[in-house]
Amino acid sequence: MNKKAQIQSKLGIIIISLIIFVLLLIFLLKLHAYFSKSDREICRSSVLAQSLLMQAPTPGSEKIVTPKCKTYKVVFFNDHVEIDDKTIEVYDSRKKDFVKKFNGLTDEIVNQVIAEELRWCWYQFLEGKKSLFNIKTLFAGGSVLSCYLCDEITFDSSVGEKEFKSFYNYTKHKTMPNSQMTYYEYYAEESRLYSPFYDRDPDKNAWEEYVQGRGNEVFISEKCKELEVSLFEPRKPITKNIIFDTSKKYAVVFIKEGITSKVREIIGTKEEGCSPETYFSYILSFDDLSEQCKSLRRGSMK
């Protein structure tokens, strides 16, 4: 068997295996949706299925699965917190217990709720480890800076405090539920797809480098055969030490930056393509959304 035939045979086996895997995943997704009400798990499973299908060189494969991801509405009141109009439990260190009602909103309560939403946003979009660039129902294909809105966060007028602080510091020191990893280690320090395109400073991870913003920049790679140059648009820095002003609205977003050719991870020839897109999750003021997100998608809020 000549080399070309061997490659075609190998590719055929991979495609068949992929289709079988995705069909099983679709079945499990539907089964999960039937027996469980975890919208976040449904989102993650559907995003994974679509990400795998987008890598298959089969016309129309991207239509098999549509990612099902919600945008959540988070509202802080002076005595409770609601997500999608339902009161949630939060940990109140004053009571040393989880409660649904508390006597006054605190930095701790605000930070823990938003940190959890940031964690879920990063989780449901596969922690930046899979290419989602071609999923048109999530991102506009030609946009250098695209975002998916995971949460809208507001403060009710009953809240007496004008601001809540120390979110960044909270995530750097607070471990996640049932984990020894801090929130910061999870959303900032864990490896992500194509992070070497950002990891230029040995003292900063890709998440910290992205925070700094960028001027006009042209990225050139010898590995790009279809796309030799990718122009990254200028953007302002992101406020990582964010202070929540109760008169403003905030967003938890999943960000994709980069223009790329089609990813070829599935057939093991990534060097033949140029794939500099990278993914992040941040908390942004709604005032900054237009600066950081040239394209913004949102899910159902039902």
Image (cartoon, rainbow, N blue to C red):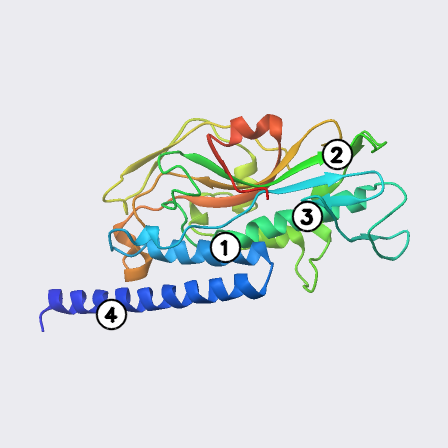
Q: Are marks 2 and 3 in contact (CB under 8 Å)?
A: no
- Front residue of this view, candidates 214 and 153: 153
* Mark 3 neighbour class, 10 Å CA radius: few under 14, some 14 to 19, many 20 or more: many
Query: For mark 1, what is the residue?
Result: 126
Rendered location of residue 77, percent (x, y): 80, 38
Rendered location of residue 6, percent (x, y): 15, 69
Identify the mark nearer the N-term, 3 or 4.
Answer: 4
Q: Amino acid at mark 4?
A: Ile
Q: CA distance from mark 2 to mark 1?
A: 29 Å
Identify the mark nearer the N-term, 2 or 1.
Answer: 1
Please report the residue visible at 53 percent of the width from the left and 64 percent of the height from the top: 32
Foreground mark, 2 or 3, reads: 2
Q: CA distance from mark 3 to mark 1?
A: 17 Å
Identify the mark nearer the N-term, 2 or 3.
Answer: 3
Query: For mark 3, what is the residue?
Result: 115
Please report the residue visible at 52 percent of the width from the left and 44 percent of the height from the top: 280
